């Protein structure tokens, strides 16, 4: 049973930059939008990743850590590809396809496999920040954040970029008790090591 982790944030908040300290041998990055990484370090990246390429890599299970960068574009690109279709079936398909990927991580990857979904946010009518979706199915029938035990919110401030690990009532951030401080550096390699230590998953050694 693998572990999906949701990393939320607005564009420019430091989501992709949080990958900067990963050892290239210990992570695989699915770059859905195909944009360059915002740092010099070279990581193994599958550009313009699709559901098919992500499933194939996860099924091989060669790594313990994967990242789906800008995962909301899996939904957005499918929506635009099917924009001329009438009716609501396309919204059902879009929601199911994304939900099924998360469920695949949970049920079809190794217990020490962690997959990070880097995802944009949107504000609700009550000004609460949540994961950005397409249509109402994932919001009304299946709250996306409910599929994740860990949801971190990436924020930028005058002090730099950081992760918020617990909700203040206006976000969907959450994490297990005593896993993290409330505010931590936006260092996903550190987050990965902390999760593995907390749940006794062992180190991230793919050798």
Image (cartoon, rainbow, N blue to C red):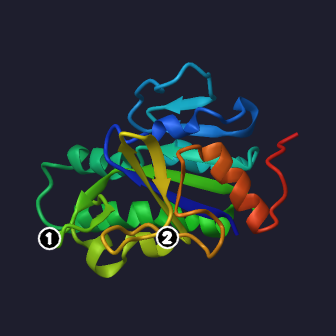
Dot label at residue 162: none
Q: Position of residue 206 (x, y in %)?
A: 83, 43
Quadrant where the C terminus lies? top right
Q: Residue at x 38, y 35 (%)?
A: 33
Residue 57 can be seen, yes or no: no
Residue 28 can be seen, yes or no: yes
Q: Residues within 10 Å of mark 2 (few under 14, many from 20)?
A: many
Q: Residue at x 64, y 34 (%)?
A: 21
Residue labelled with disc 2: 174
Q: Is residue 45 left or right of residue 51?
A: right
Nearest the viewer among 57 and 204 is 204
Where is residue 48, by image quadrant? top left
Q: Residues within 10 Å of mark 1 (few under 14, many from 20)?
A: few
Q: Are marks 1 and 2 in contact (CB under 8 Å)?
A: no
- What is the residue that sits farthest to the right in this orientation? 207
How far is the residue under mark 1 from the one under mark 2? 21 Å
Nearest the viewer among 59 and 34 is 34
> Tag 1's secondary structure?
loop
Quadrant where the N terminus lies? bottom right
Where is residue 87, by image quadrant? bottom left
- What is the residue that sits farthest to the front in this orientation? 159
Nearest the viewer among 142 and 116 is 116
Q: Position of residue 84 (x, y in %)?
A: 12, 49
> Tag 2's secondary structure?
loop
Dot label at residue 125: 1
Q: Is residue 127 left or right of residue 65?
A: left
- How many numbered badges does the structure rendering display? 2
């Amino acid at each position: 049973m693998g572990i999906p982790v949701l990393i939320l944030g607005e564009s420019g908040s430091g989501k992709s930059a949080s990958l900067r300290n990963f050892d290239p041998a210990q992570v695989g990055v699915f770059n859905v939008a195909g944009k360059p990484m915002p740092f010099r370090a070279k990581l193994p990246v599958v550009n313009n990743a699709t559901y098919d390429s992500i499933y194939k890599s996860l099924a091989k299970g060669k790594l313990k850590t994967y990242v789906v960068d800008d995962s909301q574009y899996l939904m957005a690109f499918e929506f635009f590809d099917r924009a001329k279709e009438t009716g609501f079936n396309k919204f059902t398909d879009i929601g199911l396809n994304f939900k099924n990927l998360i469920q695949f991580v949970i049920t079809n990857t190794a217990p020490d496999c962690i997959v990070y979904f880097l995802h944009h946010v949107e504000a609700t009518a009550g000004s609460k920040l949540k994961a950005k979706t397409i249509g109402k199915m994932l919001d009304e029938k299946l709250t996306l954040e409910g599929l994740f035990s860990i949801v971190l919110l990436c924020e930028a401030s005058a002090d730099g970029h950081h992760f918020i690990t617990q909700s203040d009532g206006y976000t969907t951030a959450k994490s297990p008790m005593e896993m993290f401080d409330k505010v931590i550096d936006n260092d996903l390699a550190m987050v990965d090591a902390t999760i593995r230590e907390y749940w006794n998953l062992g180190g991230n050694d793919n050798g």
